[in-house]
Amino acid sequence: MIDRITIDPAICHGKPTIRGSRLLVTTILELLASRMTWEEILADYPALEQADIQACLNYAVRLAQFRTLPLAA
């Protein structure tokens, strides 16, 4: 599933995108954080698939497991 996330220095300054597009993983995560449903996101981005959204979540989980940053109090 994580193969749906690509990182290419020539696209979006090397930030993680979905399947080589210019749609940033962080954009999808922000939409989910704003309480948009998967259905609403898919309607706004017709080229997106459910598996792409799941891949974004999996990517975020892996990042959270890799490194812990202190949160401001």
Image (cartoon, helix red, strand yellow):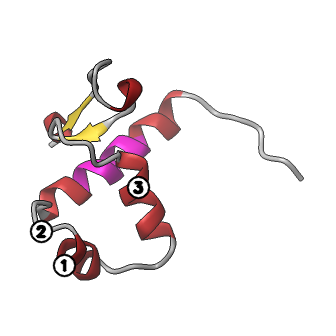
User: Cβ–Cβ below 8 Å for labels 2 and 1?
Assistant: yes
**First in residue order: circle 1 vs circle 3:** 3
Q: As shown in the figure, which amino acid type bears the numbered disc 3?
A: Thr
Q: Which residue is mark 1?
A: 43
Name the dominant secondary structure of the magenta segment: helix
Q: Which residue is mark 3?
A: 27
**First in residue order: circle 3 vs circle 2:** 3
Q: Which residue is mark 2?
A: 46
Q: As shown in the figure, which amino acid type bears the numbered disc 2?
A: Pro
Left or right: residue 48 versus residue 30 is left
* Residue 72 or residue 36, whichever sits in front: 36
Whole-Å distance between the Cαs marked 2 and 1? 6 Å
* 63 vs 73: above or below: above
Q: As shown in the figure, which amino acid type bears the numbered disc 1?
A: Ala
* Residue 65 or residue 40, whichever sits in front: 40
* Residue 22 or residue 56, whichever sits in front: 22
Q: Residue at x 39, y 31 (%)?
A: 15
